[in-house]
Amino acid sequence: MTNPTTSAAAPRAVRRYLGRLAAFLCALALPFALLIGFIGFVPETSQQSLLYTLHYKLDLLRDTRGQGNRILIAGGSASEYGVNCAAIAEATARPTYCVGVTAYLGVEMYLNMLTRYAEPGDTVILMLEHLLLRGAGVDYQVLWQACGTDPDAWACVPPTLYLGAAASAGQYLASRWPANWSPWPPANLRWTSYSYPPGETPHSDDFGPLGDVTLVRENILEHGYNTQDPVTLNAGILDETAVHSIRRFAEKMADRGVTVLFTHAPLNALCIQSGEADNLAYAAAAREALGLPVLVDYPAAIMEAEWFYDSNNHLNTAGAARYTAWLLEALDGLEI
């Protein structure tokens, strides 16, 4: 026979535990929130940078909801330079947006952004560079420069990064502090607002309204590629945490009615030091581990130097048109 006293005590014990856990989490988050609040009064001076486009991409995701059939392309900077959103939108009759910024924010950041804003009927294309699949880590200065003190951006940052972000806040504050600015008198203090009218979020002039780079560009690399950024690929470089996060995200999106696809971001053939067998083994491992339909696979995603712009994964205008045509052909084959 169940003891009524014991039965009544159990829910109370659970509530006490949950209350203490919530208090503990709040105690951890409060110092970080205060830190962001303090930095938010220091003026920003980098609204025309590539990293600042994160705010524009978040606003795109939020402000274009309700269309029910968007194509959302996410990844590192290769996604911005690698696709022509207007061409995809015209060919598919579906609104298309690129919400990638840089690989140095980590794949979890993009998955969280899409989890917040993807809606039933949307199609997500994860256009991932090898850095995002091999778990190369997050650059905390890049994270600060991209997020600033925007609550919407920090809401997408994995909590596991908060401690590292807090540790690097001083360096970011020093770089953000204007040379001739002083917090005294208090009249100088203005909170940095990230509330912009739809479509008016400041961002680099290289970008068009759909989030992709529209600047007309050709290869400007002296040797045709960045000689300081060699790449070696093989089947063993995939990061288990990144793979697990992507699979879990895809399952969650499937339950929501969102289609998730994968495509390899373009990579300059001249920078690759591994052989063809290792490159194909890497692609096969990614295909098997992620379990997602692949739009542009290897070896096609390994492109000749003539198609690149200023790095080993930024396509020039002609290269982006070529890669976009491959995406459209693959999408047509999947009948999505």
Image (cartoon, rainbow, N blue to C red):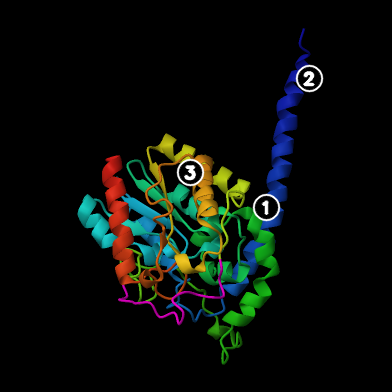
Residue 92 percent location from the top left of the image = 23, 50
Residue identifier under label 1: 26
Foreground residue among 281 and 180: 281
Residue 8 percent location from the top left of the image = 73, 22
Name the kind of residue labelled 3 in the image: Arg
The residue mark sitting in front, 3 or 2, is 3
The residue mark sitting in front, 3 or 1, is 3
Residue 153 percent location from the top left of the image = 51, 61
Disc number for residue 287: 3
The residue at 69%/50% (across/down) is 25
Q: Residues within 10 Å of mark 2 (few under 14, many from 20)?
A: few
Name the kind of residue labelled 2 in the image: Thr
Residue 159 is covered by the magenta coloring: no
Residue 313 percent location from the top left of the image = 45, 66
Residue that extends furthest to the bottom in the rendered view of this protein: 180
Name the kind of residue labelled 1 in the image: Cys
Quarter that holds the N terminus: top right
Bounds of the magenta segment: 214-230
Badge 2 marks a residue whose secondary structure is helix
C-alpha distance separating marks 2 and 1:
30 Å
